[in-house]
Image (cartoon, rainbow, N blue to C red):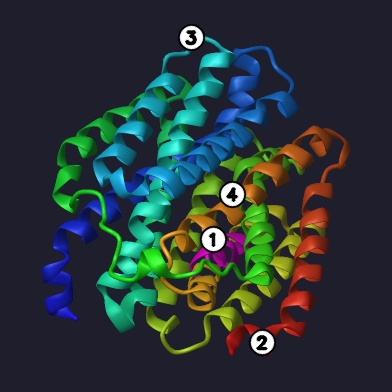
Amino acid sequence: MRELIKTNAALLSIGVLTFILMGAGQSLYGPALPAYARFYDLSLGTAGLLVSAHWIGCAFGVGAMFVWGRFVTPRVVVVLMALGAALLATGAGWSVALLGGLVFGAGYGAATVVFNPRMLRAFGPRGPAMVSLLNATFGIGAIGAPLVFVALGNDPVMAFAVCAALAAALALAAGAAGGAEAVLPGQNTMAFAPHWPMLAFALIAIGIEASVIGLGPAALIKAGESETHAAQWLSAFFLAFLAARVSLSFVAHVLPSFTLFTLAMAGASLSCLGAAGVAAGPCFVALGFFAGMFFPTGYVTASHKMGDHPWVAPAIISAGLAGGIAFPLLVSPFLAGLGTHGFFWLGGGVTAALTLLALANLRAMNR
């Protein structure tokens, strides 16, 4: 393992820094929504469109990888994120902010396709654990960014300016991670065989994750938390999110990935119900632990089911992004009318239903 890390040191280090940047950028949306609503005189539901803009941008980024993936380098995806964060930092208008979310999202989406399959292949049998570890580092940025946001006086312009500066610095170093990835021998002759049940699970799971991250702070505020406390709970959420992905790096090669996915969904259901009926803040943090398991376990399961075709990674991530776009877009207009804890009751019901469906398919998915 030490030799593998040494051989792939550039890929690992640039991948880790990119995922930290991704976590920082995405986690800023949640606490930024109330501030943007005031700054641009918007309703909270309208401000929530920024979350959907991010995920629509992700869809463009992932979709582009189906066609131009062989030309896309790690540096390209980091430059896109730097440009998106810079647009969000201009404060030039709501339309510019939405464009920034789209551009940042495009780089974010392409980055998931660039780095995850490279890590899975580069580390062989330890690939699933290293994918979990890579995605765990997302939580480092996601934990720190809301705290920086509060330290900057809840100013989204300043927060995204810091994010843009860090992205620009990373872009200068990203060339060390290598160029565009060549198609492996035989890949261009394989039939692409999507596994629709697992893609459906991925769609719903990432839709839940996107909604919780993007709309969770607003839901906490409705439940009685201050904006500052909601941002702090979000940092704690991502601390638990990080802990889950680090934990997966130790067990992902021991337990079947879909078993872990099912356990994560069950835990998320209990956490949502606890946030609705017991204590919103602490249970929201617990929800972060289980939400952190969704993507790595779902990605590895789907990869095993679908093989090594070049379209596999974009297809899995596209499914998740479809949920990431649709769920916040569907929920955010009704956020004000869901009541003080309605967002968490809704999340608890959806995750409970998905848990039962996962249990019914557990043996087939693990086969």
Residue carrying label 4: 321
Q: Is residue 236 above or below residue 67?
A: below
Q: Nearer the viewer, residue 152 or 336?
A: 336
Q: Is residue 362 above or below residue 301?
A: below
Q: Which residues are magenta?
A: 286-296
Residue carrying label 1: 316
Mark with earlier residue (3, 4): 3
Q: Nearer the viewer, mark 1 or mark 3?
A: 1
Amino acid type, callout 2: Ala
Assess disc 2: are there few (<14), some (14-19) or many (≥20) residues with their C-alpha within 10 Å of its C-alpha. Answer: few
Residue carrying label 3: 92
Q: Residue at x 38, y 81 (%)?
A: 250
Query: CA separation, marks 3 and 2?
Result: 52 Å
Q: Residue at x 62, y 72 (%)?
A: 264
Query: CA separation, marks 1 and 2?
Result: 18 Å
Amino acid type, callout 4: Leu
Quarter of the image with the N terminus is: bottom left
Quarter of the image with the C terminus is: bottom right
Q: Residue at x 86, y 42 (%)?
A: 338
Whether residue 290 appears in magenta in the rendering, the answer is yes
- Relative image position of residue 26 (x, y in whole percent): 49, 41
Residue carrying label 2: 364
Amino acid type, callout 1: Ile
Mark with earlier residue (1, 2): 1
Q: Most prominent secondary structure in the magenta stretch?
A: helix
* Residue 267 can be seen, yes or no: yes
